[in-house]
Image (tube, rainbow, N blue to C red):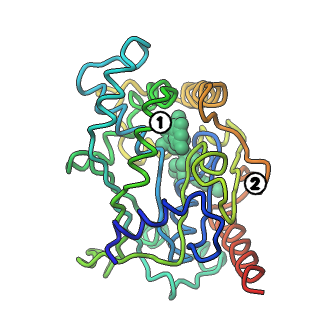
Amino acid sequence: MSSKRFVTQLCRGFSSATRTRPFQVAIDGPAASGKSTTAKMVAQRLGFSYIDTGAFYRCVTFAALSEGIDPSHLSNADKITALAEKLDIELQTVFSEKPDSYNRTTSDWNSASDASRQHQLPTTRVFLDSKDVSSDIRTGTVSKHVSAVAAIGPVREAVLQKVRNIGATDVEAQTNNGINSSARSRAAGLVMDGRDIGTVVLPLADLKVFLVADSHVRAKRRLQELVKNGADPSIDDTHLNLHAVQADLELRDEMDRTRKISPLRRAVDAMDLDTSNLTLEQQVDIIVQEVHRRRSHQKT
Ligand SMILES: Nc1ncnc2c1ncn2[C@@H]1O[C@H](COP(=O)(O)OP(=O)(O)O)[C@@H](O)[C@H]1O
Ligand SMILES: Nc1ccn([C@H]2C[C@H](O)[C@@H](COP(=O)(O)OP(=O)(O)O)O2)c(=O)n1
């Protein structure tokens, strides 16, 4: 089965209660709480597919800004919706190790060099109308406007439709330098992260996680990430200081929490996970263990 058909089938199963569908993990939480990094690593460990829904809203925002459309003007909602409907968005996640051979413990990881850890982190590339926009959608300018775009109801409908039809491709890295040319479905399950995954997109997910972290900790992590990725204040209006990054995250969280449609909200049956004092590997271990625990219950 092609990976496109595979994911489409998964998504058709969104509201199905049957036990034959692949295992679904929904990860929600505020900005920079660690959702996407954790979700990718969980998918890698378990051999699951991964879908980053925030990337879709970021693509629509980037496309609107590129066409000179200001998302902060409500009168532009129709133009942004038309754009969202016509854009072609594809995600490609590159997993660095074969999941079934991934047996690393936290202590192995902690003793590994930074370079070797970096090689082991999965990465997601985002294509907008076939162009790689992975970096373009993460700028401070896009971050500043994305919550306004995500609050437009018809844009959310268009994005959900795209997520349902997504041609997500997951590939295993062959070596540290190259990837296998043949993509393969990761049929065992799906990890999806965003703001409304456990409440709206995958309401019957087998495991829902609500990831949080102190906003100061989140800002420090996000700032480190922006600097590491070479954010350039001269071409990006990101103010590269902790105070500004924290203020941006808090403002975005407030907008995401208070919007009328599909707000950022913890699902009642979600597992809470505060990552403020955890390492990445610890939070991944907790989720992976919980998946194993629930799968073994499903089998009995
Ligand atoms: N426990 C942790 N310790 C250190 N850094 C972390 C931890 N969890 C996440 N990060 C880092 O924080 C940054 C934001 O995480 P990310 O996964 O992008 O968050 P989100 O998807 O929620 O916005 C990333 O650079 C990520 O590597
Ligand atoms: N399922 C989703 C995913 C993201 N969004 C919105 C809310 C966020 O402010 C933006 C960007 O999400 P993304 O997860 O990429 O952002 P951060 O990594 O948290 O900075 O999209 C949403 O409304 N619903």
Q: Earlier in the sequence, mark 2 or mark 1?
A: 1
Q: Which mark is residue 15?
A: none
Is 212 placed above or below 142 here?
A: below
Residue 11: image x %, image y %?
49, 60
Closer mark to the observer between disc 2 and disc 1: 1
Instruction: Write down the residue under mark 1.
Output: 156
Taking the spot 44% from the left edge, 66% from the top edge, the residue there is 9
Report the residue marked by disc 2: 270
Query: Residue 245 placed where, x, y %?
Result: 54, 30
Which residue sits at x=31%, y=74%?
2
Q: Nearer the viewer, residue 22 or 119?
A: 22
Q: Quadrant of the N terminus?
A: bottom left
Q: Is mark 1 within 8 Å of ligand 2?
A: yes
Instruction: Mark yes or no: residue 222 visible.
Output: no
Q: Is residue 232 above or below residue 183?
A: above
In the image, is 59 to the left or to the right of 299?
left
Q: How many C-alpha atoms fall within 10 Å of the one at disc 1: few (<14), some, or many (≥20)?
A: some
